[in-house]
Amino acid sequence: MINEEKVTLMTKAAIAEQHGVTDFRTGKYYKRDYVNYHVLLVGICVTIAMALILGLVAVIFIESYPEKAQHFDWVSAGFAALLGYLIVLVFYIIITMIVYTIRYNKASSKIKEYTQTLKRLDNLY
């Protein structure tokens, strides 16, 4: 005879396995490692993006105003750009830490539910 509780738990576990692929990948990491990895990736991406944007702005400025570019205070502009870069970097790092901490917590709770389902199923056998 078919035990409906077993079928329900097996179905629940199968659905969790199919839809929780990224959760299981996330569960392989410690929380701190997972968040730091993504903070590092975002830091690299922000650095590359800011370098490209500042380079593009400098080239456009030099091409558009060549006579002003000779007498322009590049040192103060560099410090202002560095300050702007640091502000943007800190902003993105804070947002990344919040987002990936929430994602990790959600994934770990789904993994805990999946583990509890498997334990209940094992107890039924």
Image (cartoon, rainbow, N blue to C red):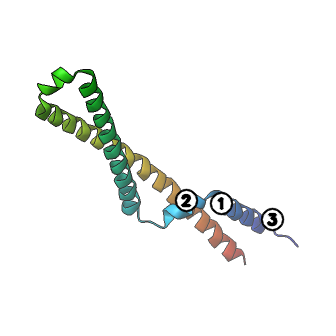
Mark 1 or mark 3, which is nearer the start of the sequence? Answer: 3
For residue 55, side relative to residue 116 (left or right)? left
Q: Amino acid at mark 3?
A: Glu
| Position of the C terminus by quadrant | bottom right
Q: CA distance from mark 2 to mark 3?
A: 27 Å
| Position of the N terminus by quadrant | bottom right
Q: Which residue is mark 3?
A: 4
Q: Which residue is mark 1?
A: 16
Q: Amino acid at mark 2?
A: Asp
Q: Amino acid at mark 1?
A: Ala
Nearest the eye: 81 or 42: 81
Q: Residues within 10 Å of mark 3 (few under 14, many from 20)?
A: few
Q: Which residue is mark 2?
A: 23
Q: Residues within 10 Å of mark 2 (few under 14, many from 20)?
A: many
Which secondary structure lies at badge 1? helix
Residue 41 lies, in percent from the top left, at 38, 53
Residue 33: name its quadrant.
bottom left
Which secondary structure lies at badge 2? helix
User: In the rendered structure, are the residues bearing label 2 and label 1 in contact, judged by CB atoms less than 8 Å apart?
Assistant: no
